[in-house]
Amino acid sequence: MRRGCGFPVLAGALGSVLALSGVSAADNLGVIYVESTTIDDRFEQKRDEPSNTRTISGEKVDESHVENLQQVLQSVPGITSEFTSGGNLKIHIRGVENQRYMGEKPGVAVVIDGVPVFERTGAVNIDLDNIESIKVVKGGASYLFGDDALAGAVIITTKRGAKLAGYRLEAERGSFNYQKYLARAGYASDNMNAHVQVSRRESDGYWFQSEYRADYVDGKLQWYVDDSSDLTFGFEASNRKKDSHGSVEGVTQAETDPQSYEGRDYARMYDVDLGKYYLTYAKDLDGGKNLLLNAYQYNDHTRFVTAPQNYTADTPPQIVTDVNAYTTGNDYKQVQRGVKSEYRSAGTGMAWMAALDLRDNTYRNYTKYLVDFKSSPSPSPLNPIRYAGTVVGDDFTREQVHAVYGEIKFQPADRFTFTVNGRYDHLALDYEDYLAALKLDKSFNVTSWRLGGNYALADTVDIYGNVSTGFRAPSISQLFAGTISPTGKTASNPDLRPEQSLNMELGLRGRGNWGGVDWDFDAAIFQLERDDYIMSTAGQYSLPVSGELEQYQNIGGMRSRGFELAMNSDRERKVALNVAYTYLLSEFTRYDNFNLLLGNRYGTYVADCSILNPATQYCLQSMNLTGNVIPRTPQHHLNLSLDYRPARGWTVTGEMDAYSSYYVDEPNTIEIGARTVFNALLRYDTRFGAANKASFFVRIDNVFDEHYYNTARGSSDGNKDGVFDAEDISIVVNPGRVWTAGLSVQF
């Protein structure tokens, strides 16, 4: 296993940055403001922010001409993301939840225009053409965002303002029949601005059955009620159709069949309708005070199929080989509603913010059989016909959140700003199973906080630090698994406690001049501890020993330590460089209950693996994984991008993205080698007429056609040969060299 150098070397790295900064005395910071918010980005500044944050402008996103959000976020230190196909992206921060891959929440709060959004799979999707800014807050962030902000938050603000007045048309084409079309119309006057935008992205995809299409309609109306207040209404509606194939089983298939023509994914054919609507009122009051009110609703209606059909309902059952034959239809409806309010007051000695967060979320699962079928070739009476139309799942969950949060900022001495945050959440879960006439409920009270400080070493250099917390409440399925499915192998545990995370970090940020070039920099060392980690007593994705019941308990733990550095040279220069580096060591601090499953999990259990017949039997090897490295957490990640402007209007961008090796499994037996990928972008921008613009670009990803894996994961003997090795892991192979070209006109 890998072992890190620990905090002494990390502190030395931070000290090196400090030495280069050329610090000097600084004056009093003057009026103090509270910039923290979960609603808007109008307070964005980093001068006295005590946490490690990173902001990407919408202009940068637009100029990058990317196809998915991962291509943008890879330039943010501390972030790893799992991208498969169809624009499906799961975001991880500082190693939290990198080991899970079957639709669990990522431990990161995602907020778009004040709306906390997440889809049923834990993934996030956003219209890339409608981004004003992306702000990443790293470390426990529940003090602002509540549940699931174990490792941080990603806050996205969509486009708005008078700058969108006029018309814009865009068209792009690329590899695998990738196409994008966009049209936008905007209006601006002295007392209002508004715009509406429609777009479509679609592709046949590189992988078998990986085609997707995403249609978006979004817009915003901002009305300036008077000189000190405005009212903003925003909406985004989308329909996405995507398949999910792309995984191959084992390194041999990754070499011989990288597009995965063989096999059938368990879940496919997604039809997703999303709707986001919000109304925000902002009022600036006398004396540096401000009031924000926000009401929102986020809808997710997802339909998809699961469970490939293997046998017909005939006697005897016949084998089914049709790749599109599935047994179960799933209809999932999620509605998130909420109201927030934030009141803040600025001052020369102290500033504060008080806020209220009320949520009312509902989740409805409905499943039924699509065809007549049998589950095995056995003619036994224990293998009855499952009939099409039979409802096999119908349940409803209501989640209510009542929370108050706030922040106090004050200056106990010149140049030093101290920040205290606190949040109290009351979460209530109500569950009803309509088929079993079952009702269950559970509630939690959770407190989150942050203590931080910022010291101005110079007019342009600050040292900052904080201790912050995050939490995640148990789910209904973890609490009441045995009650909901009494014939299953998992027992209920209504005594589960919320998971907790504790983040500590120390950083240095500011501006300096090195080599005659102005730089912005932000460097931080951190340690994130996760406790009361909810895990199965059988381990991840495994089975309990025969005769025993599995149960979710607060029995896991993990720790991440690392160093993050972001440096950006002056973008106005002919040559501009951006550097993002992450050193990350993530390990399990408690994990003594892992069962490695060998053989056929649907076969007969045998206690002795030495006599295993893997085709018809399975056995379990008990392991203690405490101290193991968390899967899919490369120890080093370096992203470099260089912008070169050879002539007026022309920009050439080169990017290098490099990862060190990483383990794909929790036992740390299978390691994927390091990889370095180069991307290139050529862009030409010009103006014509009084205020019209045109832009043309060509982008090439993976210029040298590097062969590597987008993601790899494994936890058991997938090919049922009695051995867990590289032939058992699930792999998504990178498509290789990909090109995109496009033209946009604004007038």
Image (tube, helix red, strand yellow):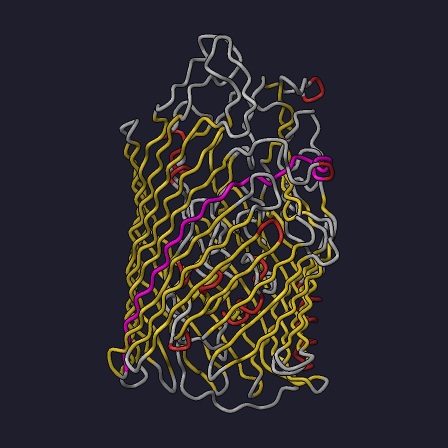
Q: In the image, is 247 to the left or to the right of 502?
A: right
Nearer-the-camera pick, 52 or 159: 159
Residue 540 figure quarter = top right
Residue 41, image x and y in percent? 41, 72
Nearer-the-camera pick, 543 or 638: 638
**Residue plotted at (47% across, 53% down):** 124
Residue 397, image x and y in percent? 32, 41
Residue 501, image x and y in percent? 49, 55
Q: In the image, is 555 to the left or to the right of 227?
A: right
Please indicate, yes or no, whether residue 513 appears anywhere in the rendered image. yes
Residue 374, image x and y in percent? 47, 17
Please indicate, yes or no, whether residue 93 appears anywhere in the rendered image. no
Q: Quadrant of the C terminus?
A: bottom left
When the figure is inspected, residue 4 is found, relative to residue 47, above or below; the finding is above
Nearer-the-camera pick, 702 or 426: 702
Q: In the image, is 77 to the left or to the right of 161?
A: right
Nearer-the-camera pick, 176 or 588: 176
Residue 243 belongs to magenta span: yes
Magenta residues, start to end: 228-254
In the rendered image, the residue lying farthest to the front is: 689
> Majority secondary structure of the magenta segment?
strand
